[in-house]
Image (cartoon, grey):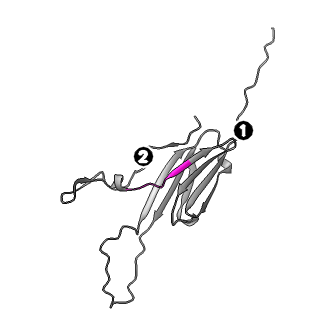
Amino acid sequence: MNDLSLFNDFFNGFGDDGYTIPTLMPTFNYKKMFQMPKVDVKEDKDTYTLTMDMPGKTEKDVDIELNQNVLTISSNDEVKKEEKSDKKSETKWLIRERSVSSFKRSFTVPEDVDCEKLTASVKDGVLTVAMPRKALAQPKRIPITCA
């Protein structure tokens, strides 16, 4: 089949299975809260093209790896510690949810992809991975001779 398929284990190693916060709700699941980047995959005669929304990311923020027909795209932003140069400031963070973001998505690459010619680029917050198709061997007719 020529469809790129997602693995079921998107969230390996991400948070616990659940954490109870009695005052807010019965259970709070980190995995359900976490949003994965949206992906579109299109196919034409010569190429599969994967596009992924990556707002605020550059090519330095994203890792792409191909291992045994499995394409893995990941990003991990570390918390940047702020130095306080002005001790007179009384500003403090009450909620800070935007300082860390990470994800890891894996796709099975179709057999007809030429894995040596994959290219990737980031422009305007969108990652594009081009996966050219290789020519598949055509069936060969074998003549039958009398023995």
The answer to whether residue 68 is visible is no
Residue 35 in the image: state x and y as whole percent. 41, 55
> The magenta stretch spans which residues?
34-40
| Identity, as a three-letter code, of the amino acid under mark 1 | Ala
Q: Quadrant of residue 80?
A: bottom left
The answer to whether residue 33 is visible is yes
| Identity, as a three-letter code, of the amino acid under mark 2 | Asp
**Could you tell which of marks 2 and 1 lies nearer the N-terminus?**
2
Q: Which mark is residue 9?
A: 2
Magenta segment: does it hold 111?
no
Q: Which residue is at a point 65% across and 39% down the rendered structure image?
A: 112
Q: Residue furthest right?
A: 146
Quadrant (top left, top right, bottom left, bottom right) of the C terminus: top right
Q: Nearer the viewer, residue 83 or 27?
A: 27
Q: Which residue is at a point 51% across and 67% down the rendered structure image?
A: 56
Q: Secondary structure at mark 1?
A: loop
Q: Which residue is at a point 60% across and 55% down the rendered structure image?
A: 128
Q: Quadrant of residue 79?
A: bottom left
Residue 60 in the image: state x and y as whole percent. 56, 66
Classify 76 as above or below 107. Answer: below
Left or right: residue 44 compared with residue 84: right
Classify 80 as above or below 146. Answer: below
